[in-house]
Image: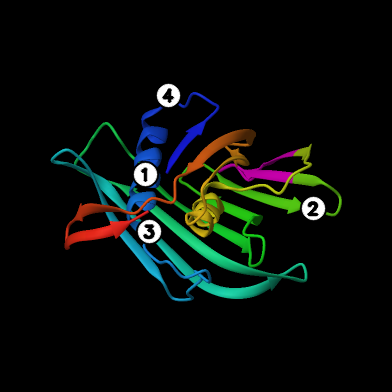
Amino acid sequence: MRFYSKRNLNSHKWLIVTLFCLSFFSFGSRSAEAHFWRIGESLNYRVMWGIIPLGTMRIDVVEKIRLDGFPVYQVTWRVDSNPLLFFINIHESFESFIDSAGVFSRKFLAHSADRERTYHFDYIENRLTMDTFLPDGSRVRDTINIQDKIQDGTSLLFYIRSQVHKSKKEEITTVIEQELMRTDVYFANKLVRIKGAGGDVDAI
């Protein structure tokens, strides 16, 4: 599987997040079952760049609830860079409320040291409301029109996981850093053997 984002993300932060995503794609899509939601599932990763430990990531499927009348899965995602790497300082957590049937985002929360962000997707009114809460207590609100079902960074991973047994190319609308962008994903439906910390595993 290959994926390309139609935006140039140059910062160290996005380099690390991209590597985290690559790690998830390599090892997280291990199940062949169509029903892939597992409440209580926890995916824990150590991300390496060669022999250098960049940090850790943890993804948890917390519970299934109803949000605005729709059944969703609450998924949390925690990213922490290696504290010994002085040039990178990432400690962020995310919460995604993912539609249980369509596997797209209905609400997204991002928590970091300098701000809190909330994205609310209203597919009836075709509106995405993005609130940013700053340390001084102020709030900045942006509203944009949407036409498609939208993925956030976390729901995108689970949507791709739900599609890995198909052979196709798909252009997916994703919101990242308050911008809508297109992500091209190529699904090869090809089983390969890769080396993991616990031994060789089959992955798609």
Do tag 3 and tag 4 residues touch (Cβ < 8 Å)? no
Do tag 1 and tag 2 residues touch (Cβ < 8 Å)? no
Residue 123 shows which numbered tag?
A: 2
Q: CA distance from mark 1 to mark 4?
A: 17 Å
Q: Nearer the viewer, mark 1 or mark 4?
A: 1
Which of the colour schemes (rainbow, by chain, secondary structure, one colour) is used? Answer: rainbow
Q: Residue 204 in the image: x percent, y percent?
A: 37, 53
Residue at which label 1 appears? 22
Q: Earlier in the sequence, mark 4 or mark 2?
A: 4
* Residue type, numbered disc 2: Tyr
Residue 136 part of the magenta-drawn span: yes
181 relative position to 42: left or right: right
Residue at which label 4 appears? 10
Start-end of magenta stretch: 129-142
Q: CA distance from mark 1 to mark 2?
A: 29 Å
Q: Earlier in the sequence, mark 1 or mark 4?
A: 4
Q: Earlier in the sequence, mark 3 or mark 1?
A: 1
Q: Is residue 199 above or below residue 132?
A: below
Q: Is residue 176 above or below residue 12?
A: below
Do tag 3 and tag 1 residues touch (Cβ < 8 Å)? no
Q: Secondary structure at mark 1?
A: helix
Q: Quadrant of residue 105?
A: bottom right
Viewer-proximal residue, 155 or 140?
155
Q: Nearer the viewer, mark 3 or mark 4?
A: 3
Can residue 82 be spotted in the picture? no
Q: CA distance from mark 3 to mark 1?
A: 10 Å
* Residue type, numbered disc 4: Asn
Q: Residue at x 59, y 75 (%)?
A: 64
Q: Secondary structure at mark 4?
A: loop
Q: Secondary structure at mark 2?
A: loop
Residue at which label 3 appears? 28
* Residue type, numbered disc 1: Leu
